Amino acid sequence: MSLTERQKQIIEIVKENQPITGDGIAEKLSLTRSALRTDFSILTGKGYLNSKPKVGYTYQERKDKKYVREIMGEAVFVDYNLSVYETILKIFAKDVGTMFITENKTLVGIVSRKDLLKIAIGKNDIEKVPINVIMTRMPNIIYCEEDELIIDGVKKIIKHQIDCVPVVRIKEVRGKKIYELVGRLTKTNITKLFLEYYEK
Ligand code: ADP
């Protein structure tokens, strides 16, 4: 929801005259305070203005979250040598939908709930099958970096029809690319952000 011209005018008045009372703002706009009541409540509700009794309104810089690092969650992973069975236990224990697979903290694979279901309903001894046999591996993993824009992470999730992307720090060690796992960006993180904006 974008701001109306009048709401933008109110913000400018507050920026220049803060702290300023509701009556003071109304006077500058040649309106009554009650005519502005809805605008005041929208602007404080959305976090643009702060209102203090007996002091008045002050402007509050709205900090919009832009980068992946601001909303990413904890990276949940298992070692690539663990079995499918142990991976399933961890996915339940950590209450996540996607599990990352690492080798010395480096991201080497990813499995979704459905990948695990698929192997579990086949005639396999899941306590013996290592997770690295069924994982989606590099270079096929879609990832993002901490300083990437959230919107670009969202585009990757939509384009590739996946639930989650790992967040990595890319390093080069002896001419080889290393993907250090630092977090995850999921549909849940993004939905929470969406809610934050709409509840303002
Ligand atoms: P589900 O399998 O439960 O629908 P996803 O849509 O996330 O979950 O995964 C679909 C397939 O894509 C799975 O086989 C999974 O291994 C793979 N996958 C999931 N996330 C990624 C990713 N970030 N990069 C590459 N492949 C992925």
Image (spheres, helix red, strand yellow):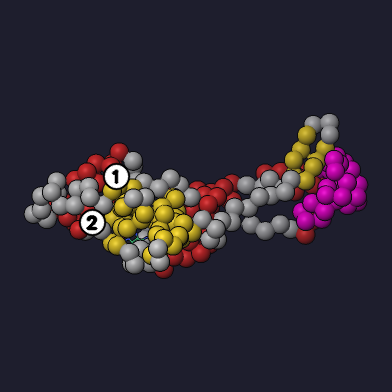
Q: Look at the picture and state if 139 lies above or below 6.
A: below
Q: Magenta region: which residues?
A: 7-34
**Picture coordinates of residue 114 (x, y %)?**
25, 55
**Picture coordinates of residue 47 (x, y %)?**
68, 45
Q: Quadrant of ligand 1?
A: bottom left
Q: Look at the picture and state if 144 lies above or below 16.
A: below
- Residue with the mark numbered 1: 91
- Residue with the mark numbered 2: 132
Q: Residue furthest left?
A: 123
Left or right position of 14 against 185: right
* Residue type, label 2: Asn
Q: Nearer the viewer, residue 101 or 1?
A: 101
At 41% across and 60% down in the image, what residue appears?
173
**Picture coordinates of residue 123 (x, y %)?**
8, 54
Instruction: Report how far apart the C-alphas of labels 2 and 1 lie in the structure.
Output: 15 Å
**Kind of element beneath mark 1:** helix
